[in-house]
Amino acid sequence: MIRALLAVALTLMLGGAARAERLIVSVSNHRVTVTPNYSGEELVLFGSVEKDASTPADRTTYDLVVTVMGPRADMVTRRKEHTFGIWINTDYRQFLQVPSYLALFANRSFEAITSPEIARRQQIGLNNVLLMQRVSGDYADVVPNDAFRSAFIRLRTQRGLYREDAAAVTFLTPTLFRTGIPLPAEVPIGTYEVEIKLFSNGAFIGKTDTAFEIVKVGFEQFVATNARQNGLVYGLVTAAMALMTGWMASIVFRKD
């Protein structure tokens, strides 16, 4: 009996996989180099929806949501208040392992692509992306209109590090698509994950993913590598350079 049930389950799983469309995607550059004069760049993501013989005949239109996430890190958002003529920090919220860069792109309004329940489950739109926080000793996400969450997203958006665009994905044909991925000048270094989700008539069909890397090159990379791998030597050299700079300044500006 158990074997029969397992066989049925396996058949259903394989049958579901056979009926699913396949996404073929790539990015224009899988390795972005950051040099001293780097001022930003835009990558191009392109791909196609591959149908098979069992694709329903009435499934002729698709929707896409592309999510790009940079390296994760802990971040803090602080609340300042004007007290006795000066601005001071009165409260803060710590965000745990959230994306340093986050972008969501679609071919039309996120609300029009799928239902609110599926959007929350698939994290469609900035308001539905999970941003884990430390709240009074506990760990949780909060409602989208939470003051700290809203401020965090607003500040990251102003720097070009968080964004959403419901008209960024273009279907060149019914199955061929493209979108741009803008990278600001202060883009974080590391590996970026790109997730592409496919919808049709409000239903989630499937997804695929790819990635690209942002690396420093030149003198900045040399300094960063040595600071990370030879911390003691880096600290001693930095201290020596500071002492030498101070000594030279005392000689140049010495009054006889």
Image (spheres, rainbow, N blue to C red):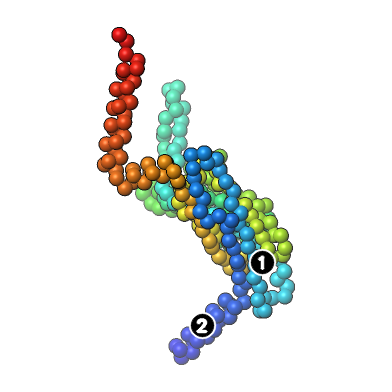
- Looking at the picture, how far across and down is residue 156, in whole percent? 52, 43
- Looking at the picture, how far across and down is residue 101, in whole percent? 51, 48
Q: Residue at x 65, y 52 (%)?
A: 168
Instruction: Identify the mark at residue 74; answer none if there is no mark.
Output: none
Q: Which residue is mark 1?
A: 200
Q: Secondary structure at mark 1?
A: strand
Q: Residues within 10 Å of mark 2 (few under 14, many from 20)?
A: few
Query: Does residue 144 appear left or right of residue 252 in this picture?
Result: right
Q: Is residue 70 above or below residue 186?
A: below
Residue lying furthest top? 256
Q: Residues within 10 Å of mark 1 (few under 14, many from 20)?
A: some
Q: Residue at x 48, y 50 (%)?
A: 214
- Label 2 – label 1 distance at C-alpha: 25 Å
* Mark before the other along the chain sequence, 2 or 1: 2
Query: Does residue 236 appear left or right of residue 57 in this picture?
Result: left
Q: In which quadrant is the C terminus drawn?
A: top left
Q: Amino acid at mark 1?
A: Ser
Q: Amino acid at mark 2?
A: Leu
- Looking at the picture, how far across and down is residue 121, in whole percent? 54, 61
Q: Is residue 214 above or below residue 246?
A: below
Nearest to the observer: residue 164 or residue 23: 23
Image-quadrant location for residue 47 = bottom right
Q: Secondary structure at mark 2?
A: helix
Nearest to the observer: residue 115 or residue 126: 126
The reply to whether residue 141 is visible in this rendering is no
Q: Which residue is mark 2?
A: 10
